[in-house]
């Protein structure tokens, strides 16, 4: 151990200024060039080719994008995969009802026939990636006008993508890296038949709920299991009962060896977005304006939802996923502001910028103006960025639900406005729309939406500049003399969008004449008036993308300014490797947090009076009887652990691997003190939180009695 510490010290000193040990989300294809040496010095036993290769099966073949925003990993040769409980939450909720409440009770398919089909769920495998910078920038020069430049790049991208997947069933994604200084192409294979296999009850999978969310010490069994199905040729296919379990090129071995402090860990997944290289102005905008305002609006939303959910179990289920979604970023923003302040991040950036300025004045005059230009742009941009954020809170991002439903009718309107109405298309569209309407009302509670609508309309008026106020406020302030409640009473009394029956009837009977009726509906008017502000005022300004060019220049400039540093690109929801080590931390004076939690902590937190801390009887029985089987470690069962891997939203569900490349955990969160890592990483405080695989196996085996699932895994004892 001592030897190891000395070794690690030596590494961090020798690499100081070049490559930091924990910070970074690295490109799998470039590990050989930049990282593998350091990874191996830290204990990793595999080669770069074992992680990412186009010539042989490798770890990347066992990692998927789960749904739209999470990561998952294969753990058997029969298509079995794990991800987080909160990633499968929508599916678990979709199959739940008051009678069959899988959210509350958990769900375990005891045979393949019992697995549950999910209409819209996909998983995406990366086949290969490629640096296509030169081809994307063909015919592009820096002195081109921005619009022309963008246009040329767009054309090039479309051509590259089309060529790359020609005559295949693959799809192509092409994304900018380093703010448009580099481009990579990703060739993907998307599977469409993904079935729910198992999930623990929320009292375990969401144990600690939003109280413990973003916090350590943590005791959440945040996992759920799915199975990928393919056609008989092992190719993607839509759901069919004839489909068979997918046989992946690679699946992870599950390690029961556990973790010690200092052990090498690697997270392999899809981090969503980070902003490491922004100027101080960006941090000012976030911490002083955007975060505080959006925190306020969500506090109000949550107050309303919590109240209705506590009063009625059916509403609790209906709004469970919505509530979790709102609460999640709300809490992260609060932590982000705190973390940046403690880091004195704005001043750190300012100091950096001073040095940068001096360097560029002396050595690289072409960048001397960048910071001054940034300042000017941010002065205006901040207002628009706030209006945009608030607009999203009003309708698209769990805002006024009745308005968001009305919004869905625009597709019908468009089809009837066309010169020749395609009747066949209409039939199909109506069918799809009716499905959406059905889903909408499954999770809709009118009194809640009514209160929320009034609240949000009032807050928008009070917080957002007049130039962004939609026309509907003319009505509210005129006819209703500013009485939002009165306006909302009228809205819900007159609109057809408040009951399923009236909406279904309206959609079924929709024809060219219905457009008039639609345009008179107050919920439609409300939605349209917000959309109008977005489309005509907010979007055009944001779309000028004044920041794009500056971001590209500043990124390139920073890379020249610190030419001995190895840069990693900001996260952009492409596959990345983060590596670090298992490690506790000091959250505040005199307090040290250990690197792992155990079942003891769950029992400690147990409190039948607090919803988030109700421990299921069955788990308590296992605890009383100390019935831990082979999952026992020193008289208890390990539950979660923390490490220094640099992760962000999207990394949820990512495999956490040990030095052998075996699965030791499932990443699901970050610790509160370090959530500012999207903007600035602090190795002392930033920790990713993972679920220990031994707890996962214990739950499947001992708690759920679904031990047969273990038979198909490759378990390393
Ligand atoms: N904070 C984690 C992440 O961003 C988990 C979120 C889900 N859990 C919750 N209690 N809302 O995804
Ligand atoms: N919980 C996050 C996710 O869903 C992970 C994180 O932000 O650390 O991806």
Image (cartoon, rainbow, N blue to C red):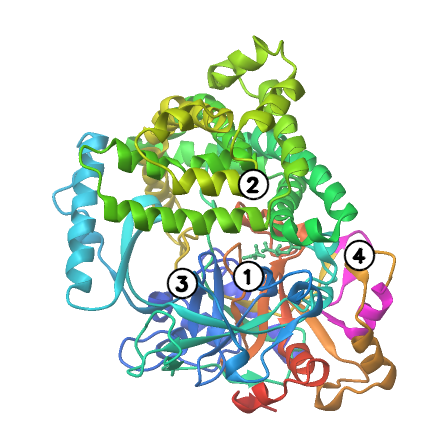
Mark 1 surroundings within 10 Å by alpha-carbon count, few (fewer than 14), some (14 through 19), many (20 or more): many
Dot 3: element: loop
Question: Can you say whether 54 is above or below 103 in the image?
Answer: below
Q: CA distance from mark 1 to mark 3?
A: 17 Å
| Tags 1 and 2 touching, CB below 8 Å | no
Mark 3 surroundings within 10 Å by alpha-carbon count, few (fewer than 14), some (14 through 19), many (20 or more): many
Which comes sooner in the sequence, label 1 or label 4? Answer: 1
Percent position of residue 68, x then y: 44, 57
| Residue 92 belongs to magenta span | no
Q: Of the residues tagged 3 and 4, which is closer to the observer?
A: 4
Q: CA distance from mark 1 to mark 2?
A: 18 Å
Nearer to me, 454 or 568: 454
Residue 415 falls left or right of residue 18: left
Nearer to me, 425 or 243: 425
Percent position of residue 28, x then y: 38, 67
Question: Can you say whether 478 is above or below 137 in the image?
Answer: above
In the picture, the disc for residue 575 is 3
Mark 2 surroundings within 10 Å by alpha-carbon count, few (fewer than 14), some (14 through 19), many (20 or more): some
Residue beneath disc 2: 398
Which comes sooner in the sequence, label 1 or label 3? Answer: 1
Q: Is mark 1 within 8 Å of ligand 2?
A: yes
Residue beneath disc 4: 611
Q: Residue lying furthest left in this view?
A: 139
| Residue 603 belongs to magenta span | yes
Dot 1: element: helix
Check the picture and name the quadrant holding the N terminus: bottom right
Question: Can you say whether 693 is above or below 383 in the image?
Answer: below
Dot 2: element: loop
Question: Can you say whether 571 is above or below 577 in the image?
Answer: above
């Amino acid at each position: 151990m001592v030897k190891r510490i000395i070794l690690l010290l030596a590494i961090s000193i020798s690499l100081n200024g070049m490559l930091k040990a924990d910070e970074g989300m690295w490109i799998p294809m470039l590990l050989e060039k930049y990282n593998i040496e350091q990874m191996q010095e830290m204990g990793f036993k595999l080669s770069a080719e074992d992680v990412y290769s186009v010539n042989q099966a490798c770890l990347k073949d066992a990692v998927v994008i789960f749904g739209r925003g999470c990561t998952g990993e294969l753990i058997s040769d029969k298509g079995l995969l794990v991800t987080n409980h909160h990633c499968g939450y929508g599916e678990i909720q979709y199959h739940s009802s008051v009678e069959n409440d899988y959210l509350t009770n958990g769900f375990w398919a005891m045979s393949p026939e019992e697995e549950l089909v999910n209409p819209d769920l996909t998983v995406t495998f990366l086949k290969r990636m490629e640096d296509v910078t030169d081809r994307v920038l063909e015919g592009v020069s820096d002195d081109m006008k921005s619009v022309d430049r963008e246009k040329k790049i767009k054309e090039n991208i479309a051509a590259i993508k089309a060529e790359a997947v020609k005559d295949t069933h693959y799809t192509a994604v092409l994304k900018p890296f380093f703010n448009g200084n580099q481009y990579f192409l990703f060739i993907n294979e998307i599977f469409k038949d993904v079935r729910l296999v198992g999930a623990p009850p929320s009292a375990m999978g969401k144990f600690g709920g939003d109280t413990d969310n973003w916090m350590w010490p943590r005791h959440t069994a945040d996992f759920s299991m799915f199975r990928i199905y393919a056609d008989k040729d092992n190719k993607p296919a839509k759901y069919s009962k004839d489909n068979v379990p997918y046989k992946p090129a690679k699946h992870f071995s599950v390690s029961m060896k556990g973790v010690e402090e200092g052990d090498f860990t690697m997270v392999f997944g899809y981090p969503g977005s980070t902003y490491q290289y922004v100027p101080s102005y960006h941090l000012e905008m976030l911490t002083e304006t955007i975060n505080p305002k959006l925190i306020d609006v969500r506090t109000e939303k949550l107050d309303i939802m919590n109240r209705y959910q506590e009063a009625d179990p059916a509403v609790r289920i209906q709004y469970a996923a919505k509530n979790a979604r709102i609460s999640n970023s709300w809490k992260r923003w609060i932590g982000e502001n705190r973390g940046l302040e403690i880091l004195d991040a704005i001043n750190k950036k300012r100091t950096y910028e001073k040095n940068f300025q001096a360097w560029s004045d002396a050595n690289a005059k072409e960048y001397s103006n960048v910071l001054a230009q940034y300042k000017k742009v941010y002065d205006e941009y901040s207002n628009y960025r706030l209006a945009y954020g608030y607009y999203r809170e009003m309708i698209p991002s769990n805002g006024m639900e009745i308005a968001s439903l009305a919004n869905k009718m625009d597709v019908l309107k468009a089809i009837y406005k066309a010169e020749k109405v395609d009747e066949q298309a209409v039939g199909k569209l109506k069918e799809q729309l009716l499905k959406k309407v059905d889903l909408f009302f499954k999770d809709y509670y009118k009194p809640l939406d009514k209160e929320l609508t009034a609240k949000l309309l009032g807050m928008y008026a009070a917080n957002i500049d007049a130039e962004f106020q939609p026309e509907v406020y003319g009505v509210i302030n005129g006819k209703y003399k500013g009485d939002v409640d009165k306006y909302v009473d009228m809205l819900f009394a007159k609109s057809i969008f408040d009951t399923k029956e009236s909406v279904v009837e309206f959609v079924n009977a929709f024809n060219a004449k219905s457009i008039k009726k639609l345009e008179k509906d107050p919920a439609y008017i409300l939605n349209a008036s917000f959309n109008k502000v977005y489309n005509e005022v907010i979007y055009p300004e944001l779309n000028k993308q004044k920041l794009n060019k500056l971001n590209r220049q500043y990124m390139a400039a920073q890379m020249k300014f610190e030419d001995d540093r190895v840069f990693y690109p900001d996260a952009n929801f492409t596959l990345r490797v983060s590596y670090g080590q298992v490690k506790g931390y000091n959250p505040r004076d005199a307090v040290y947090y250990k690197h792992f939690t155990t079942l003891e902590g769950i029992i400690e937190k147990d409190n039948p009076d607090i919803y988030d801390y109700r421990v299921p009887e069955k788990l308590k029985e296992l605890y009383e009887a100390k019935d831990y089987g082979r999952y026992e470690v020193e008289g208890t069962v390990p539950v979660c652990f923390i490490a220094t891997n640099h992760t962000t939203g999207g990394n949820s569900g990512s495999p956490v691997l040990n030095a052998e490349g075996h699965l030791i955990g499932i990443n699901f969160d970050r610790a509160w003190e370090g959530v500012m890592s999207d903007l600035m990483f602090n190795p002392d405080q930033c920790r990713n939180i993972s679920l220990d695989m031994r707890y996962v196996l214990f739950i499947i085996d001992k708690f759920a009695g679904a031990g047969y699932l273990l038979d198909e895994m490759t378990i390393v004892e």
